[in-house]
Protein backbone atom coordinates (compact mmCIF):
# COMPACT_ATOMS: atom_id res chain seq x y z
CA UNK A 1 0.00 0.00 0.00
CA UNK A 2 1.55 3.36 -1.01
CA UNK A 3 2.41 5.83 1.71
CA UNK A 4 0.50 9.15 1.82
CA UNK A 5 2.08 12.16 0.18
CA UNK A 6 4.51 13.70 2.73
CA UNK A 7 2.64 16.98 3.19
CA UNK A 8 -0.66 18.17 4.59
CA UNK A 9 0.16 16.91 8.07
CA UNK A 10 1.79 13.56 7.20
CA UNK A 11 5.24 13.09 8.75
CA UNK A 12 7.62 10.10 8.95
CA UNK A 13 8.42 10.72 12.64
CA UNK A 14 4.94 11.25 14.05
CA UNK A 15 1.21 10.96 13.58
CA UNK A 16 -1.17 13.91 13.70
CA UNK A 17 -3.45 14.03 16.74
CA UNK A 18 -6.99 14.83 15.63
CA UNK A 19 -9.23 14.19 18.65
CA UNK A 20 -8.22 17.15 20.82
CA UNK A 21 -9.86 19.92 22.78
CA UNK A 22 -10.71 23.04 20.70
CA UNK A 23 -8.73 25.30 23.06
CA UNK A 24 -5.66 23.12 22.76
CA UNK A 25 -6.11 23.06 19.01
CA UNK A 26 -5.97 26.84 18.75
CA UNK A 27 -3.10 27.39 21.22
CA UNK A 28 -0.32 26.55 18.68
CA UNK A 29 -1.64 29.38 16.50
CA UNK A 30 -1.64 31.83 19.41
CA UNK A 31 1.89 30.74 20.39
CA UNK A 32 3.45 29.62 17.08
CA UNK A 33 6.98 28.95 18.40
CA UNK A 34 8.37 26.98 21.33
CA UNK A 35 9.99 30.15 22.66
CA UNK A 36 6.46 31.55 23.10
CA UNK A 37 5.30 28.46 24.97
CA UNK A 38 8.19 27.66 27.33
CA UNK A 39 7.31 26.74 30.90
CA UNK A 40 10.11 26.29 33.42
CA UNK A 41 10.25 24.35 36.67
CA UNK A 42 12.89 22.81 38.91
CA UNK A 43 13.17 19.68 41.01
CA UNK A 44 15.63 19.02 43.80
CA UNK A 45 16.22 15.31 43.32
CA UNK A 46 16.99 13.40 46.56
CA UNK A 47 20.30 11.62 45.97
CA UNK A 48 20.12 9.14 48.85
CA UNK A 49 17.84 6.62 47.06
CA UNK A 50 19.94 6.91 43.89
CA UNK A 51 23.18 6.42 45.83
CA UNK A 52 21.79 3.38 47.65
CA UNK A 53 20.71 1.78 44.36
CA UNK A 54 24.04 2.59 42.68
CA UNK A 55 26.02 1.05 45.57
CA UNK A 56 23.78 -2.03 45.66
CA UNK A 57 24.16 -2.64 41.92
CA UNK A 58 27.89 -1.90 42.01
CA UNK A 59 28.31 -4.69 44.57
CA UNK A 60 26.70 -6.97 41.99
CA UNK A 61 29.11 -5.83 39.28
CA UNK A 62 26.95 -3.28 37.41
CA UNK A 63 27.88 0.39 37.41
CA UNK A 64 25.14 3.00 37.23
CA UNK A 65 25.24 6.81 37.19
CA UNK A 66 22.63 9.44 37.99
CA UNK A 67 22.23 10.02 34.25
CA UNK A 68 21.29 6.37 33.67
CA UNK A 69 18.57 6.59 36.28
CA UNK A 70 17.23 10.00 35.20
CA UNK A 71 16.85 8.85 31.59
CA UNK A 72 15.45 5.41 32.50
CA UNK A 73 12.81 7.06 34.68
CA UNK A 74 11.85 9.50 31.91
CA UNK A 75 11.56 6.68 29.36
CA UNK A 76 9.11 4.98 31.68
CA UNK A 77 7.23 8.26 32.20
CA UNK A 78 6.73 8.61 28.45
CA UNK A 79 5.47 5.03 28.34
CA UNK A 80 2.94 5.63 31.10
CA UNK A 81 2.03 9.21 30.14
CA UNK A 82 2.22 9.21 26.33
CA UNK A 83 0.74 12.69 25.87
CA UNK A 84 4.12 14.01 26.97
CA UNK A 85 5.52 12.44 23.81
CA UNK A 86 3.88 14.95 21.50
CA UNK A 87 5.16 17.88 19.49
CA UNK A 88 3.93 20.88 17.53
CA UNK A 89 4.78 21.48 13.88
CA UNK A 90 3.24 24.21 11.73
CA UNK A 91 0.28 24.62 14.07
CA UNK A 92 -0.50 20.89 14.20
CA UNK A 93 -0.15 18.55 17.17
CA UNK A 94 1.59 15.22 16.57
CA UNK A 95 2.58 12.24 18.66
CA UNK A 96 6.07 10.80 18.25
CA UNK A 97 6.34 7.34 16.74
CA UNK A 98 9.08 6.46 19.26
CA UNK A 99 10.39 7.54 22.64
CA UNK A 100 13.68 9.26 21.86
CA UNK A 101 16.29 10.90 24.09
CA UNK A 102 19.11 13.17 22.89
CA UNK A 103 22.19 14.22 24.83
CA UNK A 104 25.72 15.53 24.31
CA UNK A 105 28.86 13.42 24.59
CA UNK A 106 32.16 15.24 25.11
CA UNK A 107 34.90 13.86 22.82
CA UNK A 108 37.58 14.19 25.46
CA UNK A 109 38.17 15.83 28.85
CA UNK A 110 39.69 19.03 27.42
CA UNK A 111 37.60 22.24 27.33
CA UNK A 112 38.57 22.47 23.65
CA UNK A 113 37.31 18.98 22.82
CA UNK A 114 34.32 19.01 20.43
CA UNK A 115 30.88 17.67 21.30
CA UNK A 116 29.01 14.77 19.74
CA UNK A 117 25.22 14.84 19.67
CA UNK A 118 23.57 11.47 20.28
CA UNK A 119 19.96 10.33 19.96
CA UNK A 120 18.66 7.00 21.31
CA UNK A 121 15.31 5.34 20.64
CA UNK A 122 13.29 3.34 23.17
CA UNK A 123 10.02 1.43 23.20
CA UNK A 124 9.18 2.32 26.81
CA UNK A 125 9.18 -1.31 27.95
CA UNK A 126 12.92 -1.38 28.73
CA UNK A 127 14.37 -2.13 32.14
CA UNK A 128 16.84 0.29 33.70
CA UNK A 129 19.61 -2.16 32.76
CA UNK A 130 18.63 -2.09 29.09
CA UNK A 131 18.56 1.72 29.15
CA UNK A 132 22.01 1.75 30.82
CA UNK A 133 23.46 -0.50 28.14
CA UNK A 134 22.17 1.69 25.31
CA UNK A 135 23.54 4.84 26.91
CA UNK A 136 26.95 3.32 27.64
CA UNK A 137 27.27 1.96 24.10
CA UNK A 138 26.48 5.39 22.64
CA UNK A 139 28.95 7.14 24.94
CA UNK A 140 31.70 4.62 24.19
CA UNK A 141 31.15 5.02 20.45
CA UNK A 142 31.33 8.82 20.56
CA UNK A 143 33.72 9.85 23.35
CA UNK A 144 36.91 10.06 21.32
CA UNK A 145 38.20 12.61 18.81
CA UNK A 146 38.19 10.12 15.94
CA UNK A 147 34.49 9.25 16.34
CA UNK A 148 32.12 10.59 13.68
CA UNK A 149 28.43 9.79 13.81
CA UNK A 150 25.81 10.69 11.23
CA UNK A 151 25.07 14.05 12.82
CA UNK A 152 28.77 14.99 12.71
CA UNK A 153 28.91 14.13 9.00
CA UNK A 154 25.87 16.26 8.10
CA UNK A 155 27.19 19.23 10.11
CA UNK A 156 30.60 18.91 8.45
CA UNK A 157 29.02 18.71 4.99
CA UNK A 158 27.00 21.90 5.59
CA UNK A 159 29.98 23.84 6.92
CA UNK A 160 32.16 23.04 3.89
CA UNK A 161 30.24 25.73 2.01
CA UNK A 162 30.52 29.55 2.36
CA UNK A 163 28.61 31.21 5.20
CA UNK A 164 25.77 32.49 3.00
CA UNK A 165 25.20 28.95 1.69
CA UNK A 166 25.15 27.55 5.24
CA UNK A 167 22.43 30.05 6.11
CA UNK A 168 20.50 29.14 2.94
CA UNK A 169 20.88 25.39 3.53
CA UNK A 170 19.75 25.57 7.15
CA UNK A 171 16.82 27.77 6.13
CA UNK A 172 15.81 25.22 3.50
CA UNK A 173 15.99 22.37 6.02
CA UNK A 174 13.83 24.31 8.48
CA UNK A 175 11.30 25.12 5.73
CA UNK A 176 11.13 21.48 4.67
CA UNK A 177 10.70 20.38 8.28
CA UNK A 178 7.90 22.87 8.88
CA UNK A 179 6.01 21.63 5.82
CA UNK A 180 6.65 17.92 6.52
CA UNK A 181 8.84 17.28 3.47
CA UNK A 182 12.17 16.86 5.29
CA UNK A 183 13.61 13.44 4.36
CA UNK A 184 13.31 10.82 7.06
CA UNK A 185 17.04 10.10 6.73
CA UNK A 186 17.81 13.59 8.07
CA UNK A 187 15.14 13.38 10.79
CA UNK A 188 16.61 10.09 12.05
CA UNK A 189 20.05 11.69 12.42
CA UNK A 190 18.85 14.99 13.86
CA UNK A 191 19.19 15.17 17.67
CA UNK A 192 16.69 18.05 17.61
CA UNK A 193 13.89 15.72 16.47
CA UNK A 194 13.43 13.98 19.80
CA UNK A 195 11.10 13.50 22.74
CA UNK A 196 13.59 14.66 25.38
CA UNK A 197 16.89 16.53 25.27
CA UNK A 198 19.09 16.15 28.35
CA UNK A 199 22.21 18.07 29.30
CA UNK A 200 24.33 16.61 32.09
CA UNK A 201 25.99 19.65 33.69
CA UNK A 202 26.75 17.46 36.70
CA UNK A 203 29.35 15.56 34.67
CA UNK A 204 31.44 18.75 34.38
CA UNK A 205 30.59 19.84 37.95
CA UNK A 206 28.44 22.68 36.67
CA UNK A 207 25.14 24.08 37.96
CA UNK A 208 21.83 23.10 36.40
CA UNK A 209 20.50 25.57 33.84
CA UNK A 210 17.13 26.37 32.31
CA UNK A 211 17.94 25.44 28.73
CA UNK A 212 15.75 26.92 26.01
CA UNK A 213 13.71 24.73 23.67
CA UNK A 214 14.83 24.71 20.05
CA UNK A 215 12.35 26.09 17.54
CA UNK A 216 13.89 23.71 15.01
CA UNK A 217 12.96 20.06 15.37
CA UNK A 218 10.41 18.50 17.71
CA UNK A 219 11.92 18.66 21.22
CA UNK A 220 9.11 19.19 23.74
CA UNK A 221 11.04 18.79 27.01
CA UNK A 222 14.57 19.87 27.89
CA UNK A 223 16.17 18.71 31.15
CA UNK A 224 19.41 19.84 32.77
CA UNK A 225 21.12 17.92 35.59
CA UNK A 226 23.35 20.00 37.88
CA UNK A 227 26.10 19.34 40.43
CA UNK A 228 24.69 17.85 43.63
CA UNK A 229 25.22 19.58 46.98
CA UNK A 230 24.41 19.19 50.67
CA UNK A 231 21.46 21.27 51.81
CA UNK A 232 19.22 21.47 54.90
CA UNK A 233 16.10 19.30 54.54
CA UNK A 234 13.24 18.32 56.81
CA UNK A 235 12.95 14.56 57.41
CA UNK A 236 9.80 12.54 58.10
CA UNK A 237 10.09 13.31 61.83
CA UNK A 238 10.07 17.06 61.21
CA UNK A 239 13.76 17.40 62.02
CA UNK A 240 16.15 19.55 60.01
CA UNK A 241 19.02 17.42 58.74
CA UNK A 242 21.67 17.62 56.03
CA UNK A 243 20.53 16.06 52.77
CA UNK A 244 22.15 15.53 49.39
CA UNK A 245 20.20 17.00 46.50
CA UNK A 246 20.76 17.26 42.76
CA UNK A 247 19.01 20.13 40.94
CA UNK A 248 17.15 19.21 37.76
CA UNK A 249 15.83 22.12 35.71
CA UNK A 250 13.02 21.36 33.29
CA UNK A 251 11.74 23.43 30.36
CA UNK A 252 8.60 22.27 28.55
CA UNK A 253 6.42 23.22 25.61
CA UNK A 254 3.04 23.84 27.22
CA UNK A 255 1.03 23.65 24.00
CA UNK A 256 0.60 19.86 23.67
CA UNK A 257 -0.05 18.91 27.30
CA UNK A 258 -2.15 20.46 30.08
CA UNK A 259 -0.67 21.27 33.48
CA UNK A 260 -2.56 18.60 35.42
CA UNK A 261 -1.36 15.85 33.09
CA UNK A 262 2.22 17.07 33.19
CA UNK A 263 2.29 17.36 36.99
CA UNK A 264 0.84 13.85 37.32
CA UNK A 265 3.55 12.53 35.02
CA UNK A 266 6.36 14.24 36.91
CA UNK A 267 5.05 12.96 40.26
CA UNK A 268 5.34 9.47 38.81
CA UNK A 269 8.90 10.32 37.72
CA UNK A 270 9.72 11.40 41.28
CA UNK A 271 8.36 8.13 42.67
CA UNK A 272 10.56 6.17 40.29
CA UNK A 273 13.66 8.06 41.39
CA UNK A 274 12.84 7.52 45.05
CA UNK A 275 12.60 3.75 44.43
CA UNK A 276 14.73 3.07 41.32
CA UNK A 277 14.84 -0.68 41.99
CA UNK A 278 11.32 -0.97 40.57
CA UNK A 279 12.79 -0.16 37.13
CA UNK A 280 14.80 -3.41 37.22
CA UNK A 281 11.58 -5.08 36.06
CA UNK A 282 10.31 -4.35 32.53
CA UNK A 283 7.12 -2.41 32.02
CA UNK A 284 4.43 -4.87 30.98
CA UNK A 285 2.39 -2.64 28.68
CA UNK A 286 2.28 0.86 27.24
CA UNK A 287 -0.47 3.38 27.89
CA UNK A 288 -2.42 4.60 24.86
CA UNK A 289 -2.23 8.19 23.69
CA UNK A 290 -5.89 9.15 23.96
CA UNK A 291 -7.56 12.51 24.38
CA UNK A 292 -11.32 12.90 24.83
CA UNK A 293 -12.56 16.26 23.55
CA UNK A 294 -14.75 18.36 25.84
CA UNK A 295 -17.96 18.03 23.83
CA UNK A 296 -17.77 14.23 23.75
CA UNK A 297 -17.09 14.12 27.48
CA UNK A 298 -20.21 16.21 28.18
CA UNK A 299 -22.34 13.91 26.01
CA UNK A 300 -21.00 10.83 27.76
CA UNK A 301 -21.76 12.35 31.19
CA UNK A 302 -25.30 13.18 30.05
CA UNK A 303 -25.84 9.64 28.76
CA UNK A 304 -24.61 8.19 32.06
CA UNK A 305 -27.08 10.36 34.01
CA UNK A 306 -29.96 9.25 31.77
CA UNK A 307 -28.99 5.61 32.28
Image (spheres, rainbow, N blue to C red):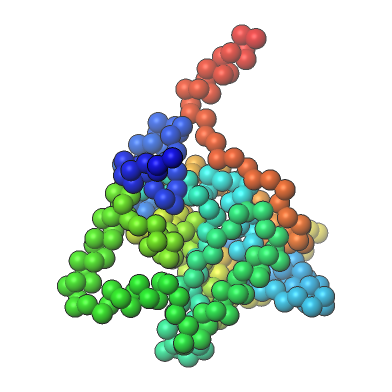
* Residue 40 visible to an observer of this rendering: no
Query: Does 247 appear above or below 260?
Result: below
In this view, the residue farthest toward the left is 164
* Depth check, front residue: 46 or 155: 155
Residue at the (48%, 26%) spot, across then down:
294
**Picture quadrant where residue 302 is located:** top right
Q: Position of residue 304 (x, y in %)?
A: 62, 15
Q: Quadrant of the C terminus?
A: top right
Residue at the (70%, 73%) spot, across then down:
64
Q: Position of residue 99 (x, y in %)?
A: 55, 55
Residue at the (45%, 48%) spot, across then down:
14
Q: Position of residue 305 (x, y in %)?
A: 62, 12
Going by the image, does 105 lie left or right of 228? left
* Depth check, front residue: 219 or 142: 142
* Depth check, front residue: 204 or 228: 204
Going by the image, does 54 lie left or right of 288? right
Residue at the (28%, 74%) spot, across then down:
158
Query: Does 48 appear above or below 260?
Result: below
* Depth check, front residue: 22 or 205: 22
**Picture quadrant where residue 2 is located:** top left
Q: Position of residue 252 (x, y in %)?
A: 46, 54
Query: Does 146 appear above or below 275?
Result: below
Q: Quadrant of the N terminus?
A: top left
Q: Number of numbered discs present?
A: 0
**Picture quadrant where residue 59 is located:** bottom right
Amino acid sequence: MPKPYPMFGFRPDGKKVKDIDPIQRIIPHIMPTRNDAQNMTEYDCPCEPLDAFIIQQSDKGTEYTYMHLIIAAMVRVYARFPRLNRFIMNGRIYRHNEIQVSFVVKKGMSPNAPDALVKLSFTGLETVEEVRQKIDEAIEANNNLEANNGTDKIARLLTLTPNFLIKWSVGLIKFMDKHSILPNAIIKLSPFHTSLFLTNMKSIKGPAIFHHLYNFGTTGIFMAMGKESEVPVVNDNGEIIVGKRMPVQIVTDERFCDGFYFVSAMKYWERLLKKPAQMLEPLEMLAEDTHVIFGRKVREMAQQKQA
